[in-house]
């Protein structure tokens, strides 16, 4: 399956926002004097999973667009279930393993929502 340019462009947009918000989060940990390597590892895990989740959602939508309605619904449901499981596993690892700071894992999972909320402000078509 070839990745559509729209999926690439939107994933790039999300990745940039996740990176910027991750740097800001790291700075807050530094200012609060709570930064250590577990914050960095947690941020990397959470940020990677957040961007991967968005990319996989884009692939699911790309695939569903070319299908009949019933098959498209099934494709999206399977995609959502798999991606949700991936998010829960990442959050679980972040909470259970001492190598990761739990907040630094979970917070980046919310960054794509922030990026999507700000999208209309930066959309050149508006």
Image (cartoon, rainbow, N blue to C red):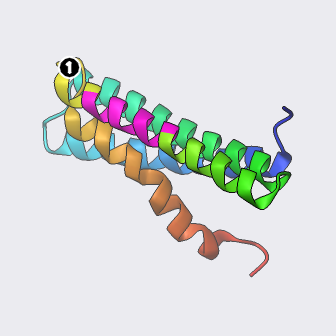
In the image, 37 versus 115, the foreground residue is 115
Vertical relation: 38 (above or below) 9 = above
Which part of the image, by quadrant, shows the C terminus?
A: bottom right
Label 1: how many Cα within 10 Å (few below 14, some 14–19, many 20+): few
Image quadrant in which you'd find residue 79: top right
Along the horizontal axis of the image, is 81 left or right of 122?
A: left
Circle count: 1
Whether residue 15 is visible, yes or no, is: no
Image quadrant in which you'd find residue 104: top left
Q: Position of residue 81 (x, y in %)?
A: 49, 43
**Span highlighted in magenta in the image:** 82-92
Given the current orientation, which residue lies at the most extreme left position? 33
Q: Which residue is mark 1?
A: 97
Given the current orientation, which residue lies at the most extreme bottom position? 126
Q: Position of residue 111 (x, y in %)?
A: 43, 52
- Residue at the (49%, 32%) spot, across then down: 48
Along the horizontal axis of the image, is 124 left or right of 53?
A: right
Q: Position of residue 54 (x, y in %)?
A: 58, 46
In the image, 68 versus 30, the foreground residue is 68
Vertical relation: 44 (above or below) 6 = above
Along the horizontal axis of the image, is 6 left or right of 43?
A: right
Image quadrant in which you'd find residue 22: top left
- Residue at the (63%, 41%) spot, across then down: 55
Vertical relation: 24 (above or below) 105 = below
- SS under mark 1: loop
Q: Position of residue 49 (x, y in %)?
A: 47, 34
Whether residue 39 is visible, yes or no, is: yes
- Residue at the (76%, 72%) spot, across then down: 124
- Residue at the (79%, 76%) spot, across then down: 125
- Per the picture, the main secondary structure of the magenta-coloured stretch is helix
Which part of the image, by quadrant, shows the N terminus?
A: top right
In the image, 74 versus 108, the foreground residue is 74
């Amino acid at each position: 399956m070839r990745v559509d340019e729209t999926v690439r462009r939107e994933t790039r947009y999300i990745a940039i926002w996740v990176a910027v918000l991750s740097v800001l989060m790291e700075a807050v940990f530094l200012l609060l004097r709570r930064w250590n390597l577990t914050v960095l590892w947690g941020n990397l895990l959470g940020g990677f999973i957040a961007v991967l989740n968005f990319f996989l959602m884009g692939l699911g939508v790309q695939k569903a667009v070319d299908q009949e309605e019933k098959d498209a619904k099934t494709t999206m449901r399977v995609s959502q279930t798999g991606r949700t499981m991936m998010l829960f596993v990442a959050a679980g690892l972040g909470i259970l393993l001492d190598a990761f700071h739990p907040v630094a894992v979970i917070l980046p999972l919310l960054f794509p929502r922030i990026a999507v909320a700000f999208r209309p402000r930066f959309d050149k078509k508006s």
